[in-house]
Image (cartoon, rainbow, N blue to C red):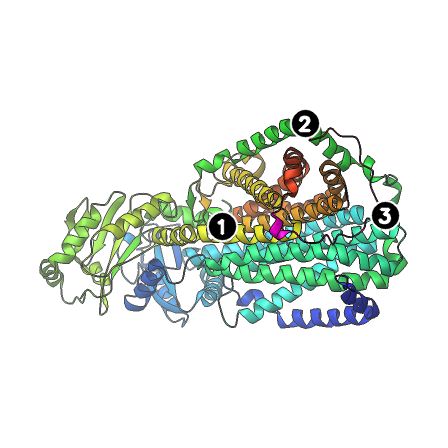
């Protein structure tokens, strides 16, 4: 006799419920203990491919030339005089000396150390201190935070404030933590109220929380272990935590709902649990495998951020599924009759109705009476929402994601206004094999320029590139293809034992935009006198765009293929998986359009404030955000399809199967989406544009999916397809193993397809 799926597994869980709960509790404590301090260990970066030319150029500049983009820029202002005044000069030299004595700093260049005109404002009331830090991203982050705390503020007659990439990162993390705490303060009570309303009791509402805690604990422990072998992004931890909580709610709602259905049909607790795991367990497993497989496709991107998201995401998905199939059944056994105790909304609930008279059942019937009209209307809405995607401008976020009131944002704006973009936005062209040593007086430097006509010609060609304002090299300064100034004492910084480098000042002040990416490509296209590495913000953006665009077809292809095969095995239909993928793509396109309209074009500014961050859409964040949306939407799709397919295999026609399936799961996936959207929407209260984008984008994605896609388009499209929904090549047909219905639903009258 064939053994029923999950029957032995379920029996062992029932017999050892206390042992399962106890071991889970111990495991969670050990995992949390092991993961202590994880956030301090994780990398704040991972946004660019480690092997990119821009990353290599920055490394060569730092090691060979004590140059490159400074990670920390201190702006010293003399409010009552000039930075050249004796007291200001003494304070500036003391500040430089104290910084240079810090072993965490690789080099310091300040106006009082090297009095270059470019390091002093034109009105002489402020000057710059440029700092390059030692170590990896984690060491840079820790050192920058400490230096900002110690050296900003009053320093004698000077007032010191901080900017630069490290300062922006430090401020971003501070505001991110502040925003997350505020979001939790707002979201947690709302989520508990939703779970209390949906699950009907305090004890039942706590079940998803328990499963989520177990999943998140397992994932943080795994990321802690993974951090010992590879770079793991801090940002991935936040995404996987949110995903784990969302899936814990999904799986718990599905299993608790089915368990109650079986109890209501007359089954005893043990039999009800067995049937729940036999039917709902299969759905949970398929859903988890599809989501994990789609997240694993991110491993094809050579970005540490996306790869760590793939590792953490796949882990939290599996942990949520295992927790739902082990811990949740054990808790149901231990709760017994106490599952439905303490229903605080008991007086507000309406009596349960038959399936055929439920609201979702009636909605599905109404949609399927006019399937063509509903399909056209819903598709038109999605197309309109997706239209702004055609105007997307990809880039990378910089200090403009910070609120205008942030001290770092204020300092960054002053830097642009008073010093231009040369210390922050300049591109660098490194010629590692080009002899570059210089010594002697300026006349000797001039002789070197004459003696190196090849480098001189190369600098002239770079200065002719559209979008270049100025090129500085050891052979002089160049504009519009001409040398406008001979080398001086400051030109020595471009020479080193390992070669030479050139600084390219862009014409605009936004290198992390499409213009910056195009400029980097144009600089790389200029014939160089040997191997050349182009670095800087624009080059980093171009490298990231290149790897994302180059690997995107493979990622999409793998995701689509794996999802299609798994849905094919789950539904035993060819058309239904195709329909699911197409509708999912339409939903994600509409979400992308909304994100572009709000966070690039500035719509809804009166509600959310200025969230345009330079009028670009970050090239990496949408990949993170939409992979989560794709996983959750496929999760909702599997839940809906599981009931539709089961009902059809029991003998119902397509229309009845769809209506029953939507009635059984509509409240489930809508409630799950509402919980997840509440958590995400709370992030919009943050002052950080990045958190606003993620929160609003994911909230809209799941709400759009559970309304327009699942409630309208799925019934309409399946009604139009009719019998074609269930077509399967004869080679793939298998014997029907469907579970007998415990609550048969009579078919309501409906016109034939």
In terms of depth relative to the viewer, which is nearer, 171 or 213? Answer: 213
Q: CA distance from mark 3 to mark 1?
A: 46 Å
In terms of depth relative to the viewer, which is nearer, 434 or 380? Answer: 380
Query: Which quadrant, please, contains the C terminus?
Result: top right
Where's residue 347, x and y in %? 89, 42
* Residue ID for mark 2: 370
Query: Which quadrant, please, contains the N terminus?
Result: bottom right
Q: Earlier in the sequence, mark 1 or mark 2?
A: 2
In terms of depth relative to the viewer, which is nearer, 342 or 665? Answer: 665
Mark 3: secondary structure: loop
Of circles 2 and 3, the one toward us is 2
Residue 556: numbered disc: 1
Residue 344: numbered disc: 3
Q: CA distance from mark 2 to mark 3?
A: 40 Å
Where's residue 652, x and y in %? 76, 40
Above or below, 498 against 287 in this view is below
- Magenta span contains residue 742: yes
Q: Which residues are magenta?
A: 729-746
**Residue drawn at point x = 13 percent, y = 64 percent:** 441
**Residue drawn at point x = 53 percent, y = 33 percent:** 383
Mark 2: secondary structure: loop
Q: CA distance from mark 1 to mark 2?
A: 33 Å
Above or below, 426 against 7 in this view is above
Q: Earlier in the sequence, mark 2 or mark 3?
A: 3
Left or right, residue 463 beside residue 728: left
How many marks on residues?
3
Where's residue 282, x and y in %? 71, 56
Q: Residue furthest front?
A: 730
Q: Earlier in the sequence, mark 3 or mark 1?
A: 3
């Amino acid at each position: 006799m064939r053994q029923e799926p999950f029957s032995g597994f379920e029996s062992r869980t029932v017999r050892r419920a206390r042992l399962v709960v106890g071991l889970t509790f111990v495991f969670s404590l050990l995992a949390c203990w092991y993961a202590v301090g994880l956030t301090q260990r994780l990398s704040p970066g991972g946004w660019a491919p480690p092997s990119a030319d821009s990353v290599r150029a920055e490394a060569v500049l730092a090691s060979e030339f004590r140059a490159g983009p400074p990670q920390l820029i201190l702006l010293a202002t003399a409010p009552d005089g000039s930075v050249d005044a004796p007291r200001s000069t003494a304070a500036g030299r003391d500040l430089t000396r104290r910084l240079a004595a810090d072993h965490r700093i690789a080099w310091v260049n300040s106006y009082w150390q090297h009095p270059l005109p470019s390091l002093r404002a034109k009105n002489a009331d402020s000057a710059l201190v440029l700092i390059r830090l030692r170590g990896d991203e984690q060491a840079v982050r820790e050192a920058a935070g400490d230096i900002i705390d110690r050296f900003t503020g009053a320093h004698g007659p000077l007032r010191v404030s901080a900017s630069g990439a490290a300062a922006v990162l430090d401020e971003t993390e501070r505001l991110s933590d502040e925003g997350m705490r505020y979001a939790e303060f707002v979201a947690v009570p709302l989520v508990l109220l939703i779970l209390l309303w949906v699950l009907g009791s305090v004890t039942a509402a706590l079940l998803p929380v328990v499963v989520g805690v177990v999943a998140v604990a397992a994932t943080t422990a795994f990321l802690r272990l993974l951090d010992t072998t590879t770079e793991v992004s801090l940002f991935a931890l936040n995404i996987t935590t949110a995903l784990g909580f969302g899936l814990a709610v999904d799986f718990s709602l599905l299993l608790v709902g089915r368990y109650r259905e079986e109890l209501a049909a007359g089954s005893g607790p043990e039999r009800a649990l067995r049937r729940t795991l036999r039917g709902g367990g299969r759905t949970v497993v398929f859903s988890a495998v599809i989501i994990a497989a789609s997240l694993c496709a991110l491993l094809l991107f050579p970005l540490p951020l996306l790869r760590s998201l793939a590792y953490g995401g796949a882990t939290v998905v599996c942990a949520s599924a295992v927790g739902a199939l082990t811990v949740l059944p054990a808790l149901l056994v231990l709760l017994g009759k106490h599952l439905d105790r303490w229903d605080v909304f008991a007086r507000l609930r309406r009596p349960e109705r038959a399936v055929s008279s439920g609201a979702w059942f009636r909605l599905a019937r109404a949609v399927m009476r006019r399937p063509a009209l509903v399909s056209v209307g819903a598709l038109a809405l999605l197309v309109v929402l997706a239209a702004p995607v055609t105007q997307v401008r990809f880039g990378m976020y910089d200090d403009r994601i910070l609120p205008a009131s942030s001290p770092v944002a204020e300092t960054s704006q002053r830097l642009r206004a008073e010093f231009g973009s040369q210390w922050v936005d300049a591109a660098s062209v490194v010629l590692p094999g080009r002899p570059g040593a210089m010594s002697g007086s300026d006349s000797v430097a001039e002789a070197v320029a004459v003696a190196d006509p090849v480098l001189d010609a190369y600098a002239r060609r770079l200065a002719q590139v559209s979008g270049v304002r100025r090129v500085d090299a050891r052979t002089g300064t160049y504009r519009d293809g001409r040398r406008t100034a001979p080398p001086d004492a400051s030109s020595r910084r471009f020479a080193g034992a390992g070669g030479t480098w050139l600084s390219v000042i862009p014409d605009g002040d936004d290198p992390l935009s499409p213009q910056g990416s195009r400029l980097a490509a144009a600089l790389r296209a200029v014939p160089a006198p040997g191997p050349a590495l182009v670095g800087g913000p624009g080059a980093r953006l171009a490298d990231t765009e290149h790897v994302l665009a180059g690997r995107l077809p493979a990622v999409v292809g793998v995701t689509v293929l794996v999802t299609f095969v798994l849905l094919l095995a789950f539904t035993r239909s060819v058309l239904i998986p195709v329909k699911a993928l197409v509708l999912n793509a339409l939903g994600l396109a509409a979400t992308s359009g909304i994100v572009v309209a709000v966070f690039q074009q500035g719509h809804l500014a009166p509600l959310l404030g200025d969230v345009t961050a330079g009028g670009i859409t970050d090239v990496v964040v949408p990949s993170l955000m939409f992979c989560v949306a794709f996983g959750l939407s496929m999760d909702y799709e599997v839940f809906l399809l599981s009931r539709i397919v089961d009902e059809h295999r029991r003998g119902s026609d397509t229309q009845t199967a769809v209506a029953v399936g939507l009635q059984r799961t509509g409240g489930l996936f809508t409630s799950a989406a509402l919980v997840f959207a509440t958590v995400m929407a709370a992030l919009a209260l943050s002052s950080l544009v990045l958190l606003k984008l993620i929160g609003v984008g994911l909230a809209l994605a799941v709400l759009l999916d559970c309304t327009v896609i699942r409630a309208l388009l799925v019934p309409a499209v399946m009604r139009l397809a009719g019998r074609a929904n269930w077509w399967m090549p004869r080679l793939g047909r298998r014997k029907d193993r469907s579970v007998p219905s415990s609550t048969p639903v009579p078919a309501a009258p409906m016109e034939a397809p």
